[in-house]
Image (cartoon, rainbow, N blue to C red):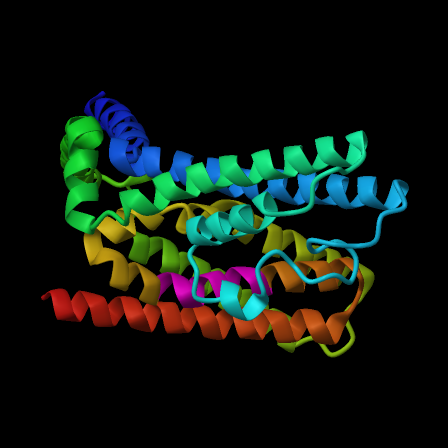
Protein backbone atom coordinates (compact mmCIF):
# COMPACT_ATOMS: atom_id res chain seq x y z
CA UNK A 1 0.00 0.00 0.00
CA UNK A 2 2.76 2.44 0.93
CA UNK A 3 4.53 1.79 -2.35
CA UNK A 4 1.32 2.51 -4.28
CA UNK A 5 0.96 5.85 -2.50
CA UNK A 6 4.58 6.63 -3.27
CA UNK A 7 4.12 5.86 -6.97
CA UNK A 8 1.02 8.06 -7.10
CA UNK A 9 2.93 10.93 -5.52
CA UNK A 10 5.83 10.44 -7.94
CA UNK A 11 3.45 10.46 -10.92
CA UNK A 12 1.58 13.57 -9.77
CA UNK A 13 4.83 15.32 -8.85
CA UNK A 14 6.36 14.53 -12.22
CA UNK A 15 3.32 15.91 -14.01
CA UNK A 16 3.31 19.12 -11.96
CA UNK A 17 7.06 19.67 -12.32
CA UNK A 18 6.94 19.07 -16.09
CA UNK A 19 3.84 21.21 -16.61
CA UNK A 20 4.88 24.22 -14.55
CA UNK A 21 8.51 23.87 -15.63
CA UNK A 22 7.42 24.40 -19.23
CA UNK A 23 5.88 27.80 -18.42
CA UNK A 24 7.44 30.88 -20.00
CA UNK A 25 7.79 34.14 -18.14
CA UNK A 26 5.03 36.58 -19.15
CA UNK A 27 7.51 39.07 -20.61
CA UNK A 28 9.37 36.47 -22.62
CA UNK A 29 6.14 34.89 -23.87
CA UNK A 30 4.89 38.29 -24.96
CA UNK A 31 8.18 39.00 -26.74
CA UNK A 32 7.92 35.69 -28.61
CA UNK A 33 4.38 36.54 -29.70
CA UNK A 34 5.49 39.95 -30.95
CA UNK A 35 8.43 38.48 -32.82
CA UNK A 36 6.16 35.86 -34.37
CA UNK A 37 3.73 38.53 -35.56
CA UNK A 38 6.59 40.56 -37.01
CA UNK A 39 7.94 37.51 -38.83
CA UNK A 40 4.49 36.80 -40.29
CA UNK A 41 4.33 40.40 -41.46
CA UNK A 42 7.41 39.71 -43.62
CA UNK A 43 5.40 37.08 -45.47
CA UNK A 44 2.63 39.62 -45.98
CA UNK A 45 5.17 42.07 -47.41
CA UNK A 46 6.47 39.43 -49.82
CA UNK A 47 2.94 38.58 -50.93
CA UNK A 48 2.00 42.22 -51.46
CA UNK A 49 5.21 42.81 -53.42
CA UNK A 50 4.49 39.88 -55.74
CA UNK A 51 0.93 41.14 -56.30
CA UNK A 52 2.25 44.61 -57.11
CA UNK A 53 4.78 43.26 -59.63
CA UNK A 54 2.10 41.07 -61.22
CA UNK A 55 -0.20 44.08 -61.57
CA UNK A 56 2.55 46.09 -63.26
CA UNK A 57 3.25 43.26 -65.68
CA UNK A 58 -0.44 42.85 -66.58
CA UNK A 59 -0.74 46.59 -67.21
CA UNK A 60 2.23 46.50 -69.55
CA UNK A 61 4.40 48.72 -67.35
CA UNK A 62 8.15 48.35 -67.37
CA UNK A 63 9.73 46.65 -64.31
CA UNK A 64 10.47 49.11 -61.47
CA UNK A 65 10.92 49.32 -57.69
CA UNK A 66 12.43 45.86 -57.45
CA UNK A 67 10.08 44.09 -59.83
CA UNK A 68 11.70 41.95 -62.49
CA UNK A 69 15.28 42.94 -63.13
CA UNK A 70 14.89 46.47 -61.78
CA UNK A 71 16.82 47.81 -58.81
CA UNK A 72 15.27 47.12 -55.40
CA UNK A 73 13.92 49.90 -53.19
CA UNK A 74 17.03 49.61 -51.03
CA UNK A 75 20.31 48.38 -52.47
CA UNK A 76 21.62 45.15 -50.88
CA UNK A 77 24.83 46.81 -49.70
CA UNK A 78 22.83 49.59 -48.06
CA UNK A 79 20.44 47.10 -46.46
CA UNK A 80 23.12 44.94 -44.78
CA UNK A 81 23.82 47.19 -41.74
CA UNK A 82 20.13 48.02 -41.19
CA UNK A 83 17.83 46.39 -38.68
CA UNK A 84 14.46 45.12 -39.86
CA UNK A 85 12.67 48.28 -38.68
CA UNK A 86 15.29 50.50 -40.31
CA UNK A 87 15.06 48.54 -43.55
CA UNK A 88 11.28 48.93 -43.64
CA UNK A 89 11.68 52.67 -43.00
CA UNK A 90 14.12 52.98 -45.92
CA UNK A 91 11.83 50.97 -48.20
CA UNK A 92 8.84 53.14 -47.29
CA UNK A 93 10.84 56.32 -47.98
CA UNK A 94 11.74 54.97 -51.41
CA UNK A 95 8.25 53.85 -52.37
CA UNK A 96 6.52 56.98 -51.10
CA UNK A 97 8.58 59.06 -53.51
CA UNK A 98 7.66 56.87 -56.45
CA UNK A 99 5.78 57.82 -59.63
CA UNK A 100 2.14 58.88 -59.63
CA UNK A 101 -0.54 58.43 -62.28
CA UNK A 102 -0.43 54.66 -62.30
CA UNK A 103 -3.36 52.59 -63.54
CA UNK A 104 -6.00 51.88 -60.87
CA UNK A 105 -5.09 48.23 -60.43
CA UNK A 106 -1.38 48.97 -60.17
CA UNK A 107 -1.98 51.91 -57.82
CA UNK A 108 -4.12 49.76 -55.55
CA UNK A 109 -1.52 46.97 -55.46
CA UNK A 110 1.21 49.51 -54.79
CA UNK A 111 -0.79 51.00 -51.94
CA UNK A 112 -1.30 47.51 -50.44
CA UNK A 113 2.45 46.92 -50.70
CA UNK A 114 3.16 50.21 -48.91
CA UNK A 115 0.60 49.32 -46.23
CA UNK A 116 2.27 45.93 -45.65
CA UNK A 117 5.62 47.70 -45.29
CA UNK A 118 4.14 50.10 -42.73
CA UNK A 119 2.62 47.28 -40.69
CA UNK A 120 5.88 45.34 -40.77
CA UNK A 121 7.86 48.45 -39.72
CA UNK A 122 5.52 49.03 -36.78
CA UNK A 123 5.80 45.45 -35.55
CA UNK A 124 9.59 45.26 -35.93
CA UNK A 125 9.97 48.62 -34.19
CA UNK A 126 8.10 47.20 -31.18
CA UNK A 127 10.24 44.04 -31.17
CA UNK A 128 13.53 45.93 -31.41
CA UNK A 129 12.50 48.47 -28.77
CA UNK A 130 11.82 45.65 -26.29
CA UNK A 131 15.38 44.35 -26.67
CA UNK A 132 16.54 41.03 -25.27
CA UNK A 133 15.67 39.73 -21.81
CA UNK A 134 18.44 38.45 -19.59
CA UNK A 135 18.31 35.13 -17.75
CA UNK A 136 17.66 36.83 -14.42
CA UNK A 137 14.60 38.63 -15.72
CA UNK A 138 13.30 35.50 -17.40
CA UNK A 139 13.85 33.40 -14.27
CA UNK A 140 12.08 35.88 -12.00
CA UNK A 141 9.19 36.07 -14.46
CA UNK A 142 8.93 32.28 -14.60
CA UNK A 143 8.99 32.04 -10.80
CA UNK A 144 6.05 34.40 -10.61
CA UNK A 145 3.84 32.14 -12.73
CA UNK A 146 5.23 28.61 -12.46
CA UNK A 147 7.67 28.51 -9.57
CA UNK A 148 5.15 27.52 -6.90
CA UNK A 149 3.65 24.65 -8.94
CA UNK A 150 7.11 23.44 -9.93
CA UNK A 151 8.22 23.46 -6.28
CA UNK A 152 5.17 21.46 -5.21
CA UNK A 153 5.87 18.94 -7.98
CA UNK A 154 9.49 18.50 -6.90
CA UNK A 155 8.38 18.10 -3.26
CA UNK A 156 5.89 15.39 -4.24
CA UNK A 157 8.60 13.66 -6.28
CA UNK A 158 10.95 13.62 -3.30
CA UNK A 159 8.29 12.43 -0.86
CA UNK A 160 7.02 9.77 -3.26
CA UNK A 161 10.56 8.54 -3.96
CA UNK A 162 11.30 8.34 -0.23
CA UNK A 163 8.10 6.35 0.40
CA UNK A 164 8.92 3.95 -2.46
CA UNK A 165 12.45 3.50 -1.15
CA UNK A 166 11.20 2.75 2.35
CA UNK A 167 8.68 0.28 0.94
CA UNK A 168 11.41 -1.46 -1.07
CA UNK A 169 13.61 -1.65 1.98
CA UNK A 170 10.76 -3.14 3.99
CA UNK A 171 10.09 -5.71 1.26
CA UNK A 172 13.79 -6.46 1.20
CA UNK A 173 13.85 -7.24 4.90
CA UNK A 174 10.86 -9.52 4.48
CA UNK A 175 12.41 -11.14 1.42
CA UNK A 176 15.73 -11.75 3.14
CA UNK A 177 13.92 -13.62 5.92
CA UNK A 178 12.42 -15.97 3.37
CA UNK A 179 12.80 -15.64 -0.38
CA UNK A 180 10.17 -17.00 -2.76
CA UNK A 181 9.69 -20.72 -2.14
CA UNK A 182 12.25 -20.42 0.67
CA UNK A 183 15.00 -21.25 -1.80
CA UNK A 184 18.26 -19.26 -1.77
CA UNK A 185 19.71 -17.92 -5.02
CA UNK A 186 22.89 -19.89 -4.49
CA UNK A 187 20.95 -23.14 -3.98
CA UNK A 188 18.98 -22.56 -7.19
CA UNK A 189 22.14 -21.74 -9.11
CA UNK A 190 23.86 -24.91 -7.87
CA UNK A 191 20.82 -26.99 -8.83
CA UNK A 192 20.75 -25.56 -12.37
CA UNK A 193 24.51 -25.99 -12.69
CA UNK A 194 24.33 -29.65 -11.61
CA UNK A 195 21.45 -30.38 -14.00
CA UNK A 196 23.18 -28.74 -16.97
CA UNK A 197 26.49 -30.40 -16.10
CA UNK A 198 24.77 -33.80 -16.02
CA UNK A 199 23.03 -33.08 -19.31
CA UNK A 200 26.28 -31.93 -20.95
CA UNK A 201 28.13 -35.04 -19.71
CA UNK A 202 25.44 -37.36 -21.08
CA UNK A 203 25.41 -35.55 -24.43
CA UNK A 204 29.22 -35.63 -24.73
CA UNK A 205 29.22 -39.37 -24.05
CA UNK A 206 26.99 -40.01 -27.05
CA UNK A 207 28.69 -39.86 -30.44
CA UNK A 208 25.68 -40.64 -32.63
CA UNK A 209 22.45 -39.85 -30.76
CA UNK A 210 19.21 -41.48 -31.77
CA UNK A 211 15.94 -39.61 -32.26
CA UNK A 212 14.72 -40.88 -28.89
CA UNK A 213 17.93 -39.64 -27.24
CA UNK A 214 17.52 -36.21 -28.79
CA UNK A 215 13.94 -36.01 -27.55
CA UNK A 216 15.07 -37.05 -24.06
CA UNK A 217 17.79 -34.39 -24.00
CA UNK A 218 15.24 -31.80 -25.14
CA UNK A 219 12.80 -32.83 -22.40
CA UNK A 220 15.50 -32.62 -19.72
CA UNK A 221 16.56 -29.20 -20.96
CA UNK A 222 12.94 -28.00 -20.93
CA UNK A 223 12.54 -29.13 -17.32
CA UNK A 224 15.56 -27.08 -16.26
CA UNK A 225 14.42 -24.04 -18.23
CA UNK A 226 10.82 -24.06 -16.98
CA UNK A 227 11.60 -24.69 -13.31
CA UNK A 228 14.90 -23.78 -11.63
CA UNK A 229 16.18 -21.52 -14.43
CA UNK A 230 12.92 -19.56 -14.63
CA UNK A 231 12.90 -19.03 -10.85
CA UNK A 232 16.58 -18.08 -10.97
CA UNK A 233 16.00 -15.40 -13.62
CA UNK A 234 13.00 -14.04 -11.70
CA UNK A 235 15.04 -13.50 -8.54
CA UNK A 236 16.63 -10.28 -9.78
CA UNK A 237 14.99 -7.93 -7.22
CA UNK A 238 16.01 -10.16 -4.29
CA UNK A 239 19.58 -10.41 -5.61
CA UNK A 240 19.76 -6.64 -5.99
CA UNK A 241 18.57 -6.10 -2.43
CA UNK A 242 21.14 -8.55 -1.10
CA UNK A 243 24.16 -7.77 -3.28
CA UNK A 244 23.40 -4.34 -4.73
CA UNK A 245 23.06 -3.24 -8.34
CA UNK A 246 26.70 -3.95 -9.20
CA UNK A 247 26.52 -7.41 -7.66
CA UNK A 248 23.36 -8.16 -9.58
CA UNK A 249 25.09 -7.14 -12.82
CA UNK A 250 28.04 -9.41 -12.07
CA UNK A 251 25.72 -12.37 -11.53
CA UNK A 252 23.13 -11.80 -14.23
CA UNK A 253 25.52 -11.07 -17.06
CA UNK A 254 26.77 -14.68 -17.29
CA UNK A 255 23.37 -15.99 -16.15
CA UNK A 256 21.59 -14.24 -19.03
CA UNK A 257 24.20 -15.59 -21.44
CA UNK A 258 23.62 -19.10 -20.11
CA UNK A 259 19.87 -18.75 -20.59
CA UNK A 260 20.33 -17.65 -24.22
CA UNK A 261 22.63 -20.59 -24.95
CA UNK A 262 20.19 -23.03 -23.36
CA UNK A 263 17.46 -21.65 -25.61
CA UNK A 264 19.77 -22.05 -28.60
CA UNK A 265 20.54 -25.63 -27.61
CA UNK A 266 16.84 -26.41 -27.30
CA UNK A 267 16.17 -24.98 -30.77
CA UNK A 268 19.08 -26.97 -32.20
CA UNK A 269 17.70 -30.18 -30.65
CA UNK A 270 14.33 -29.46 -32.25
CA UNK A 271 16.10 -29.04 -35.62
CA UNK A 272 18.19 -32.20 -35.00
CA UNK A 273 21.36 -30.11 -35.22
CA UNK A 274 23.54 -32.13 -32.85
CA UNK A 275 26.88 -30.20 -33.01
CA UNK A 276 25.20 -26.84 -32.31
CA UNK A 277 23.07 -28.20 -29.45
CA UNK A 278 26.14 -29.76 -27.80
CA UNK A 279 28.23 -26.59 -28.23
CA UNK A 280 25.45 -24.44 -26.78
CA UNK A 281 25.03 -26.67 -23.73
CA UNK A 282 28.78 -26.52 -23.11
CA UNK A 283 28.67 -22.72 -23.41
CA UNK A 284 25.74 -22.52 -21.00
CA UNK A 285 27.65 -24.67 -18.51
CA UNK A 286 30.68 -22.36 -18.70
CA UNK A 287 28.47 -19.32 -18.11
CA UNK A 288 26.77 -20.94 -15.11
CA UNK A 289 30.16 -21.76 -13.63
CA UNK A 290 31.17 -18.10 -14.11
CA UNK A 291 28.00 -16.97 -12.34
CA UNK A 292 28.71 -19.31 -9.44
CA UNK A 293 32.28 -18.01 -9.23
CA UNK A 294 30.98 -14.43 -9.08
CA UNK A 295 28.52 -15.43 -6.36
CA UNK A 296 31.28 -16.96 -4.24
CA UNK A 297 33.29 -13.75 -4.69
CA UNK A 298 30.36 -11.61 -3.53
CA UNK A 299 29.69 -13.83 -0.54
CA UNK A 300 33.36 -13.77 0.42
CA UNK A 301 33.47 -9.97 0.11
CA UNK A 302 30.35 -9.69 2.26
CA UNK A 303 31.91 -11.74 5.00
Which of these two is toward me, 23 or 150? 23
Residue drawn at point x = 37 percent, y = 53 percent: 188
Instruction: Answer whether residue 255 is magenta in the image.
Output: yes
Along the horizontal axis of the image, is 261 left or right of 14?
Answer: right
Which of these two is toward me, 236 or 105? 105
Which of these two is toward me, 116 or 263? 116
What is the span of residues highlighted in magenta in the rendered image?
Answer: 251-261
Is 29 situated above or below 244? Answer: above
Residue drawn at point x = 52 percent, y = 48 percent: 93
Residue 262 in picture, x, y percent from top left = 58, 62
Q: Quadrant of residue 28?
A: top left
Q: Quadrant of the C terminus?
A: bottom left
Residue drawn at point x = 42 percent, y = 43 percent: 124
Which of these two is toward me, 10 or 186? 10
Q: Quadrant of the N terminus?
A: top left
Is 195 situated above or below 53? Answer: below
Residue 297 in picture, x, y percent from top left = 23, 72
Amino acid sequence: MNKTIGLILVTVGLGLAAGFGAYLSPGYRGALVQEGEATLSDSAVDGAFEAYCTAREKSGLAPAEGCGDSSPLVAPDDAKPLSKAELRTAQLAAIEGGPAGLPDGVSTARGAYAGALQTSRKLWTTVEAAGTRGPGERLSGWLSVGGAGFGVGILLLLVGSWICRKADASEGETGDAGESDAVDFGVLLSSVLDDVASLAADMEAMEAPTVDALDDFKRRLEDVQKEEMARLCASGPAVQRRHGLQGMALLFSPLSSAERKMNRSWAALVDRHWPESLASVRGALNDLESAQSELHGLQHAGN
